[in-house]
Amino acid sequence: MRVVLYSKPDCGLCDELKQELLEIRKELQFELVERNILQDDEAFTRYRYLVPVLDIEGGELLYPPHRWDIVYNALRAAYRQAT
């Protein structure tokens, strides 16, 4: 399963969500890909006012505010679907 985190530099919310994802990854195996929206014109146009955005393969896009339980449950559901 692949999880894409759309973020940008100097974004405290992005850093916080990334740390939560790394903790969850200890339990649920997934590939975490971080995309800097400042280096991707399409992603910037789409998410510039919304970061961090989480794109879970086999799941939905998650927009802020990110609650740990919602992120965890979405990852768990996608993980179950992938295996």
Image: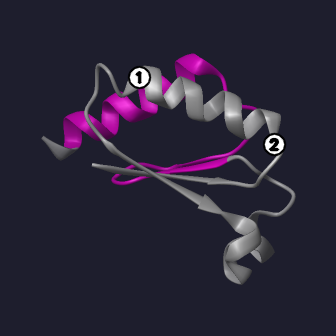
Q: The C terminus is located in which quarter? A: top left
**Residue 26 in the image: above or below residue 56:** above
Q: Residue furthest left?
A: 83
- Dot 1 lies on which element? helix
Name the residue beneath numbered marker 2. Answer: 11
Read off the magenta span. Answer: 53-81
Kind of residue indicated by mark 1: Ile
| Residues under numbered marks 2 and 1 in contact, where contact means CB atoms less than 8 Å apart | no
Q: How is the image coloured?
A: one colour
Q: Residue 46's image quarter?
A: bottom right
- Percent position (x, y) of residue 25? 36, 28
Mark 2 or mark 1, which is nearer to you? 2
Q: Residue 26's image quarter?
A: top left
Q: Residue at x 46, y 28 (%)?
A: 22
- Dot 2 lies on which element? loop
Name the residue beneath numbered marker 1. Answer: 24
Crowding near pointer 1: few (<14 within 10 Å), some, many (20+)? some
Give the mark nearer the N terminus: 2 vs 1: 2
- Percent position (x, y) of residue 37? 71, 66
Kind of residue indicated by mark 2: Cys
- Percent position (x, y) of residue 10? 83, 45
Q: Is residue 15 magenta?
A: no
Give me the C-alpha separation between circle 2 and circle 1: 20 Å
Q: Residue at x 76, y 69 (%)?
A: 38
Q: On the picture, is 79 further left or further right than 16? A: left
